[in-house]
Each structure stands twice: as C-alpha cells, then as structure tokens.
Image (spheres, grey):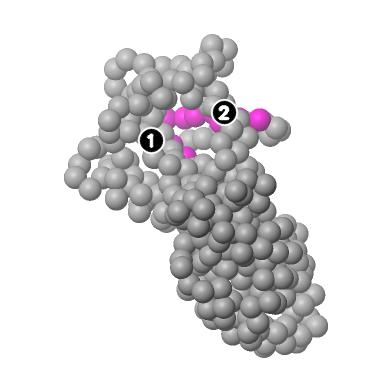
Amino acid sequence: MDPLSDMLTMLTVKRAAQVRFESRGPYAMRFSGVDHIKFGAVLTGRVCLWVDGDAGPLQLEAGDCYLLTDGRPYRTSNAEQVPEIDGDIFFAAARDATGVVRFGEGLPDKIVIGGSFVFDEEGAAWLRGALPPTIHIAAASTAAAPLRATLALLGTEAGGGAPGEAVIVDRLADILLVQALRAYLAKVEPEHASWLAGLADLHIGKALRSFHEDVAAEWTVARLAASAGMSRSSFAQRFRARVGIAPLDYLTRWRMVRVRRSLIDTDLAFATIAAQNGYRSRTSCSQSFKRMFGYSPHDLRANRSAKGSSAEALRQFNPGNAP
C-alpha cells in the first residue's frame, strides 16, 4: 500500500454525516470548533470563510475546496454587515432527513457541500502535524482539475435521496480528501518539513513507499537510503530536512501507531502484533510503545477488556481514565 493510502486507512475512525447547504440571499454564520478534519466545497455561488486566528478570510468561488485541520471556530458569510447567527444551532434545527440545510426563500444561489473525517487521538495528531491549519484549493489551479469530476458527482448525489446515496457520498468524500491532499502536495514548500513533504520528495518518497509496503522488514538507514538511490549520509540529512525527524524515528512512530490500532481493533497476541511491525522482541516493542504513548500495551488492552469492546472511547484512551 502506498504511504498516503496506508495512513488514511490506518488513521480514519469514522466520518461525520455530510451536509448540503443551499441558501439564497445574504447570511452570516459562526460555527464552533470541532475535533476533526473538516472539508468543504462550493458548488455554486461565492462564500467568505474566516477561521479564527487567520490573518484574513478566504474568498471561495464555485469549484473551490478547502480543508480545516486544527478545529478552530470559523465564520462563513456572503455579505458584509449581516447579523451573525449561530450556525451550529441553525444546522441542527434546519437539517432535513436527506442531509440538506436550506436558508432563505426561493431557488438557491449558493450551494456548499461539507463534511468531516474523525480520526483517533494519535491519528489526528499525526495528520495535523503535517498540514497547515487551513488549505484552500482554488478551482482555477492546475491541481484542482481532478477534483471537478468528484464535485460534480457530489453535487448530484448529496441530498438527492436516491437509493445508496449514503454509501456513494461517503466514498466520494474519501476521494475528495485524497485529491485535496494530492493538490496540497503538489504545492508544498520544501521548508515545511513533514511526512507529507517527504512523500512529495522524489527520493524520500521512494524510501517511504518501500517502508510502507513492508513495515515488518528489518529496515536500517542504509537500506532506506538504497531504496531512495542515495548514499546513507545524504539520505539521512535529506530525510530530516524534508520530514522533520530522523529516518528511524519515523519508522518507530509509524510502527507504534500500527501497534496501537491493532491492540484496539484485534484480538491478536501482542507478540504477533510486534512481529507484524518489525519487532523480534515483545519487550523492545512494549518499551517503544510506552515511550511514545505514556502507557503500556497491557494498560490499553486491560482498558479494552474492562469496557468489553473496541469502542471509540478506547481510541481516545487516556490512562487516567482507566478503571
């Protein structure tokens, strides 16, 4: 599996329900912060989006997409000096059975589709550490071309009430997220070190793909460098510059994310999980796990047993909440 697919598959917990917002006339709404990655796309009309703390608003045109990654409150509007209403309350009250929220009278002159991806605690940290708080992908940009077909399908499906709509919209939302991240990768600046920047690098990207294809292999810096077609020293220096951490630190962190997910979602023996992630020693794996998360694999499994399931509460596990 390629690294981006591996990460999104491993880190995604669930999707919050998508919503289609149809409006006519001027409006201004404020929304509270949320602990997930939010996406939106303007199908028709123009919308102003202002995230708290940003220097200024984003002016969104038809075909534009955006990602909000750090959960800050934000405001949307299409006119100045309009009384602001609480968007959370309005959407909760106005949303119909098909997931459509309508504002104003008559045929809509603005249509926006939005939704969110909820990650487990560690997954959210991993993804947010690689992304800026706000990503805007303009419809006119070259990178946005693949998004247009997805947006056209979303515009047809979302809120239409056709059989199988929920499944199709969920899948299209998956596609939209990946396409948006690809568009971001196409313009990411070299000085912004992150694993996403590493994927965008010709040489580092090769090494990351090799690792994610076989996480359990006995990887060394020399072996990673060989897969990238570089010398060991040059690779280590370039990896740290692009990703922000040393190669073996990256390997350990991703392996621990995988170990944690397996402990939550499977009944596999810890020795098996450790081996699947490149550890020949259960003790070594356990020590690395505790250094990263602050609690042991045994603590996580014990909490799971006490709760009787691998529910979402376990993904947000805090040892202070353990029985």
- Of callouts 2 and 1, which one flags the residue occurring earlier in the amino acid sequence? 1
Residue at (20, 42) in percent of width and height: 162
Indicate the position of residue 198 as horizontal and vertical percent values.
66, 67
Q: How many marks?
A: 2
Residue at (57, 78) in percent of width and height: 271
State the residue position of label 2.
Answer: 32
> Does the magenta run of residues contain 42?
yes
Assess whether mark 1 and mark 2 are in contact (beta carbons under 8 angstroms). Answer: no
Of 289 and 6, nearer the camera is 289
Of 104 and 144, nearer the camera is 104
Q: Secondary structure at mark 1?
A: strand
Bounds of the magenta span?
A: 40-52
State the residue position of label 1.
Answer: 19
Disc 2 or disc 1, which is closer to the eye?
Answer: 2
Q: Quadrant of residue 81?
A: top right
Q: Give the prevailing secondary structure in the magenta stretch.
A: strand
Residue at (78, 81) in percent of width and height: 234
Q: Quadrant of residue 215?
A: bottom right
Indicate the position of residue 171 as horizontal and vertical percent values.
35, 53
Residue 118 appears left or right of 159? right
Q: Inspect the image, locate mark 2, and give the three-letter code of the amino acid beneath it.
A: Ser
Relative to 230, does residue 41 appear above or below in the rendering?
A: above
Of 100 and 16, nearer the camera is 16
Q: Is residue 142 visible?
A: no
> Does the magenta run of residues contain 192?
no
